[in-house]
Image (cartoon, helix red, strand yellow):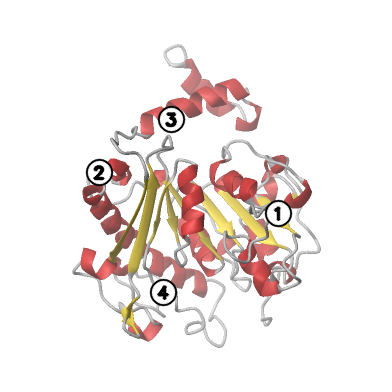
Amino acid sequence: MLRKNPIVALVPLIPMNRLSPLLLLLLGLHSVRAEAPAFNDPQPQRYKLAARASELDPRAKEHPEIDFVFEKGGKPQDVENASVDTRVAPQGKLMIWLMGHSDLLAERVNSYGIHAIQVSYANKWFGKLCQPTPKDMFARGNIRLEAATGDDVSDEIDIPKPDGMMERAFQFVKWLAKENPQGQWQQFISDDGKGIRWEKVIISGSSHGSTTAARFAMHQKVDRVVMLCGPRDQDQDWQGQVSATPANRFFGFSHVLDGGWSGDHYCRSWELLGLHRFGPIVTVDAAKPPYENSRRLISAADVKNDDKRAHSSVTPGSASPKDADGNFLFEPVWKYLYTHPVDETGEPTEIDPDCLKDHRGKK
């Protein structure tokens, strides 16, 4: 068997960070070519599309008890957004964003050759459930998982599959495949036509959304996880469970004035997820990619000493710092987070004894 396919048989025996760059490049190119159909668009452009979840799937329902509704104040609350740039060579990856729509982020992700969608799912329960404190060390994680999957894993929430993130993403991508064939969305639908090809998905979010992204990726193997200003759930232990997605595929980025960082929420989650095994915490302000191939990035850039601004600064937007020419300082960081080869990792580090691990009873 070794003689028939020596590369396939022998490569797994070699640590990936010791493979030659040429071999990794060749393997990566083969994967991209095999998995990413080329665009065939007579008018290449960046497409932006939107649809309402309630119109895409008649099974979709409202859950007003957790503020998960279709309309509020006469404005639709279930709009889902998508974008793709057919001028850019595709990577064959789909980013699913678990927070309010950020076209600035989607625009950057599209420029890397990645498709992007933002879906409507149950994400406003925080502050309504697990009050005044979670009943155990997995309660919030179970709510997050049910909101993402529609599986009955929590007795504090009742989200059926049509209203879970997984099914809503699937219904949206099915619609996109018909509405925007130029975008080659069909590649993200499983061969049996019953769901998303999760091995091609980058699950991502900020704050509350990054926490749900991490919880979901521990349940469902995905291509990559990008966690901006998160994960939180500092009084929970689900981050330390066995993960379906390998730890080297998780990437985190925070500002040091963010309360989640100064309160040791993120450093704790990062260590429970095992990210310390793939490089040190790197301050990006005076560094350049690939940031020691780390999975843990932080910044101390000027945010006017505002912790709330710091929290939002790691996502493209008005709070994110810019240089003298008006360019976002974190442009290379975002590209790294969403495109750095997952098999290129840094040297392992020890657990940080100064990062508080037990937050029970704390706010």
Q: What amino acid is labelled 1 in the image?
A: Asp
- In the rendering, at what x and y percent does residue 297 appear? 69, 53
Q: Secondary structure at mark 3?
A: helix
Name the mark nearer the viewer: 3 or 4. 3
Inter-mark Cα distance, 3 to 2: 22 Å
Q: Which mark is first along the chain, 4 or 2?
A: 4
Q: Which mark is first along the chain, 2 or 3?
A: 3
The front one of 172 and 347 is 172
Q: How many C-alpha atoms fall within 10 Å of the one at disc 2: few (<14), some, or many (≥20)?
A: some
Residue 61 to residue 97: above or below: below
Looking at the image, which residue is at 54% across and 28% down?
A: 12
Q: Quadrant of the N terminus?
A: top left
Q: What amino acid is labelled 2 in the image?
A: Pro
Residue at image mark 1: 323
Left or right of residue 187: residue 346:
right
Tag of residue 181? 2
Q: Are marks 3 and 4 in contact (CB under 8 Å)?
A: no
